[in-house]
Image (cartoon, rainbow, N blue to C red):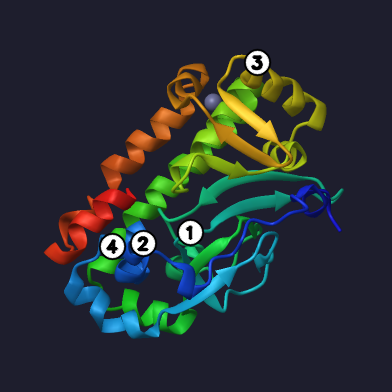
Amino acid sequence: MNTLSKALPSTPLNVSSGSSLDLSQETLGPRQNHLLASLPYSELSLWEHELELVDLKLGQILCEPGIKHTHVIFPTTAIVSLLYMTQEGTSSEIAVVGNDGVVGVSVFMGGNETPNQAMVQSAGQGYRLRTQAAKNAVNRDGPLLHMLLRYTQAMITQISQTAVCNRHHSIDQQLCRRLLVGLDRLPADDLVMTQELLASLLGVRRESVTTAALKLQEAGVIHYCRGHITVLNRKSLEHRCCECYAMVKKEQNRLMPAVHQYLPSSYRSATAMEL
Ligand SMILES: [Zn+2]
């Protein structure tokens, strides 16, 4: 068991079953994922029937380094970390994929595999698509391809800015950035995340995260209890963060089309609430 696996919360977040989803989630289905929601209805309807709803469990490995993907995954309520595992078994998070993205960009790019691991760090659900079906959809040279190219550019920005952040910004700032990144991909202000997990994702000592988290708690910005972090003051969290969070978010907003742009009118109000 590597360091990150040991750092996962002992009490996993409840995994929603299909029957427990609220009405807007049932109505939106795959369109809870913003990439899928941004596609024209005429495009998604061509292969929507091939999307398979899956539960993504805390700590589940979705792909290992050097192993070809069998599926690409569009998370809806789950959050996935893309990690690099060192030979010593420590890890560092290089990017985060939630309802804003897709796991398996290398399939679309033609490389089929990466040196990184994809691990579920917040349980939930997503939709998976067989790699061949994904390639067929991309090879139509339609909106999906163009959307994925823009998403890949946004992903490159996220990865490169993470490298900058890890090198130049304090652990206090990195913690704020990471909490905001998680928060943006969840419907509530509550993150299921131990300090051990945060330390593994940031690639720093647990004691350093504890000190940084204590500062936030004493300032009334967060409340931490048994692996649950509740953000009480998001504005303050943004104020204490380095520029990395805002820069990546601004670039993502610039590159990705408005989700509601192509949605049928019956979907728009529900999506606005989700966002
Ligand atoms: Zn930073």
Q: Nearer the viewer, mark 3 or mark 4?
A: 3
Q: How far apart are labels 1 and 3 at the CA level?
A: 30 Å
Decide which of tag 2 and tag 1 comes sooner along the chain.
2
Q: How many marks?
A: 4
| Quadrant where the N terminus is found in the figure | bottom right
Please rate how many residues cluster around mark 1, counting C-alpha atoms within 10 Å: few if below 14, some from 14 to 19, many from 20.
Answer: many
User: Measured from the top left, where is residue 140 in percent x and y?
Assistant: 26, 78
Secondary structure beneath dot 1 equals: loop
* Horizontal arrangement in the rendering, residue 181 relative to residue 45 (left or right): right
Decide which of tag 1 and tag 3 comes sooner along the chain.
1
Decide which of tag 4 and tag 2 comes sooner along the chain.
2
Question: Which residue: 25% across, 83% down?
Answer: 46
* Horizontal arrangement in the rendering, residue 78 relative to residue 89 (left or right): left
Q: Answer with the quadrant where ligand 1 appears in the image.
A: top right
Viewer can see residue 257: no
Name the residue tied to disc 2: 32
Q: How far apart are labels 4 and 1 at the CA level?
A: 14 Å
Disc 4, disc 2: CB below 8 Å?
yes
Please rate how many residues cluster around mark 2, counting C-alpha atoms within 10 Å: few if below 14, some from 14 to 19, many from 20.
Answer: many
The circle drawn on residue 218 is 3
The circle drawn on residue 77 is 1
Decide which of tag 4 and tag 1 comes sooner along the chain.
4
Question: Which residue: 48% across, 81% down?
Answer: 130
The circle drawn on residue 37 is 4
Viewer can see residue 3: yes
Disc 2, disc 1: CB below 8 Å?
yes
Secondary structure beneath dot 3 equals: helix
Disc 1, disc 3: CB below 8 Å?
no
Say what amino acid the circle numbered 4 marks. Answer: Ala
